[in-house]
Amino acid sequence: MTPETTTGYPEPAGRRYSNIYLVGFMGTGKSSVGLRLAERLGWAFCDLDSEIERVTGETVSDIFRDRGETRFRRLESDELRRVSASPGTVVALGGGAFCSEENRRVTAETGTSVWLDAPLDLIMARCEGDSSRPLFGDREAMSALLESRRPVYELADLRIEIEGLAVEGIADRILALLPAGITQQRPLRPGSPL
């Protein structure tokens, strides 16, 4: 694959591109890029992990610790379904959200998925010392987790290699690759909270 690729266009008949879903491993900038992309499109933005924290009143780390990963993944899927019903939204998914077949189906039915791909060295540099990431571990553990998820990330509609790019440059590349017409869509109520 080239650094910027599409993996399924032209789109199947009837597929709706009302949202953009940023997928990829932790530390790839999904939240920062998502916020900038939403600003440029005039769309709403949702960081799925932050939305889960808002709804539950708990941090992602606390949910993992107190209720376990299985419960967190159920909350994640529930919130994704709710958020996906708001057209004209850029959604930053948590690093493991796209690994769920159910979540991939939701994103495919309601939008375009974009994989922000980064090498392990960049991920390690960005995530080192960040205690808010419950699955962050040593280099060996992170490499194994990244490699286990890579085949799933490759199922995304678009792929952007982010190494060496600033947030604005990543947003530029995404906008250049989006299907025709998606940038003219608007949220139901611009600027309204999800």
Image: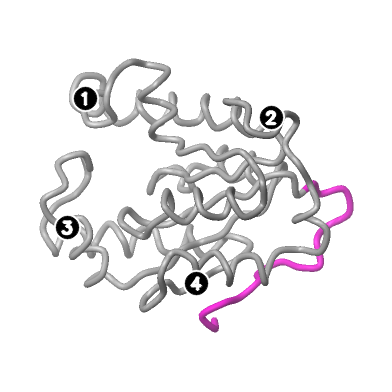
Quarter of the figure that contains the C terminus? top right
The three-letter code of the residue at mark 2 reads Ala
Q: CA distance from mark 3 to mark 1?
A: 21 Å
The residue where tag 2 is placed is: 85
Toward the viewer: 10 or 102? 10
The three-letter code of the residue at mark 3 reads Ala
Q: CA distance from mark 4 to mark 1?
A: 34 Å
Mark nearer the viewer, 4 or 2 = 4
Return the x and y of residue 37 as percentages of the image width and height: 57, 55
Around disc 3, counting alpha carbons within 10 Å, would you say few (fewer than 14), some (14 to 19), or many (20 or more)?
few
Q: Earlier in the sequence, mark 3 or mark 1?
A: 1
Return the x and y of residue 186 as percentages of the image width and height: 76, 42
Around disc 4, counting alpha carbons within 10 Å, would you say few (fewer than 14), some (14 to 19), or many (20 or more)?
few
Q: Earlier in the sequence, mark 3 or mark 2?
A: 2
Label 4 SS? helix
Return the x and y of residue 144 as percentages of the image width and height: 24, 61
The residue where tag 1 is placed is: 62
The residue where tag 3 is placed is: 141
Quarter of the figure that contains the N terminus? bottom right
The residue where tag 4 is placed is: 169
Q: Residue at x 27, y 57 (%)?
A: 145
Colouring rule applied to residues: one colour
* Residue 123 part of the magenta-drawn span: no
Q: Please state if 70 lies on the left or on the right of 3 as rendered.
A: left
Q: CA distance from mark 3 to mark 2?
A: 35 Å
Mark nearer the viewer, 4 or 1 = 4
The three-letter code of the residue at mark 1 reads Asp
Which region shows up in magenta? Answer: 1-16
